[in-house]
Amino acid sequence: MVTKQSSQRLETVAAASPAIELRRINKHFGPVHANKDIDLLVRRGTVHGIVGENGAGKSTLMSILYGFYTADSGEILVNGTPHAITDSRHALALGIGMVHQHFMLVENFTVLENIVLGAEDSRLLDTSLRRAREQLRALAKDYGLEVDPDAIIEDLSVGQQQRVEILKALYRGAEILILDEPTGVLTPAEADHLFRILRTLRDEGKTIILITHKLREIMAITDEVSVMRQGAMVKTLETAQTSPAEIAEAMVGRRVLLRVEKDQAAPGKVMLEVKNLVVADDFKIPRVKDVSFSVRAGEIVGLAGVSGNGQSELLEAITGMRDQTSGTVYLNGQPLSLEGDDGAARARAAGLAHVPEDRLRMGLVTNFQAWENTVLGYQDKYGGGPGLSIADAKAAAREHIAKFDIRPTNAELKTANFSGGNQQKIVLAREMERDPDVLVIGQPTRGVDIGAIEFIHNEIIKMRDEGKAILLVSVELDEIRSLSDRILVMFDGHIVGEADPATADEGALGLLMAGVTREGGTPGPGTMPEHVTPVERTLTEFSPKDNSSKDVSP
């Protein structure tokens, strides 16, 4: 149903003049036709979403608009005037700013120094900093972008760093702001705050272009949405007049199941057991504190929690990537020896596969070709060392590429040339195709599009049904609730609760993740607040309705 408020928003959108107009944009990278005759119109004072599968050409198109790439052909109009945008400085001069998925900040500089860097307005740095501090204070007040100007970037949370990136663009006079996958590294609370900021910016007359693969974000925040598929623009829709199912079908070219379908689990014997595990971080500070749990064959145990509460250190210790302070990890009843530099290799040899949370830092060597990344850690399967059969390894890589629909399909292409979602599928294929007894998987669909999410979820369920034990960590609470047979909640290094996803509602889990109970106290290890009436939350909840003011976590 379209409400009076959303109807007024639609009328405003329809009446607005274009801030950006792209006409027949084409871009090739060698034989790859990344953008094919793209037409796009973005109206001033709106939030315009751009969605598509990984490799659909979304980021390439916006990089052309921001001056990182030059189009092979086509025309760009900014506020009705044609411009040949040559670089990012030219884009900024035209009032176009961009917040990248991976932030462009100097980590050992302060917030203020990052804001001013490259935009000094005086030969005297102190004068520039003083003026910037005043403008920063005004911008923070106007748009809810509060951040300590004297804080060091590396000491800030990811959400605060993102605010710095937005402030950088606004300080440089951006009237058109491009955000590339802005919530991929945010907690739900940080994402909610970002949405409030974007609404404020829109209401103040700024134009927002939002690149995302999350349909919930599209339904929650955008006025219009454009769908790309295989480098072409498929359609542009008024958000209040469409649905997630329609957008997903346009993205993928077929109907997409927006919720996980699975049979009841039939857990068998305990395959992975963790007893009294204590793990410290790089500064010797305990991050995992006396944690014990088990995962059985034929079940998925989901580990929920806000990032930074010990989940990463727990996964690294279980998989042999980080030494444990004390405690024991058992695989199929046998204690695993995980200490030392070859702990991960011993874990793999014992039947444990690992999809790390950070694919770029821990899962891939991006300068390697795709086939080389498909054999990392498993070289012995193809002869190993100087006896490595490159032909067999390449043949296996081609099978992985076909089964997991990895694009491009060239196994000899450098992994750096694949989109983030396709890089993720390379890691998933490598680990899931090894027939492990236990799969430890962190953030399985981070940066992955809706069609690939459906495929990955189905593969995880298939492994469960084949009797594999799966430990799943995800910041996506919907993903945890949809896939898991049991949910463990982690806070401040402890397992503070266990829940049945069939009965636990999002509110109860969210409270535990925040370290409080419904009564306002702090949960101790093993506690779980009393459940309230279950609320089934699926993407279909966001059917056409007023989306002008509702906060929805991604």
Image (tube, helix red, strand yellow):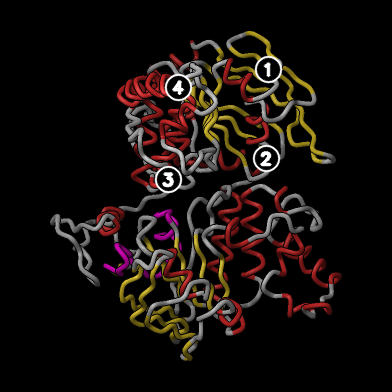
Q: Of the numbered discs in the image, which one, if any, rests on residue 158?
A: 3
Mark 1 vs mark 2: which is more N-terminal? 2
Residue to which mark 2 is pinned: 56
Residue 240, compared with residue 402, is above or below; it is above
User: Could you tell me residue 51's position as x and y percent?
Assistant: 58, 37
* Callout 2 amino acid: Ala
Is residue 5 something that shows in the picture?
Answer: no
Which range is magenta? Answer: 475-496
Residue 220, compared with residue 308, is above or below; it is above
Nearest the eye: 145 or 530: 145
Mark 4 vs mark 1: which is more N-terminal? 1
Seen from this angle, which residue lies furthest top? 81
Is residue 373 something that shows in the picture?
Answer: yes
Pointers 4 and 2 in contact (C-beta within 8 Å): no
Quarter holding the N terminus is: top left
* Callout 4 amino acid: Tyr
Mark 3 and mark 1: Cα distance apart in space: 33 Å
Mark 3 vs mark 1: which is more N-terminal? 1
Residue to which mark 4 is pinned: 171
Mark 3 and mark 4: Cα distance apart in space: 20 Å
Nearest the eye: 201 or 228: 201
Pointers 3 and 2 in contact (C-beta within 8 Å): no
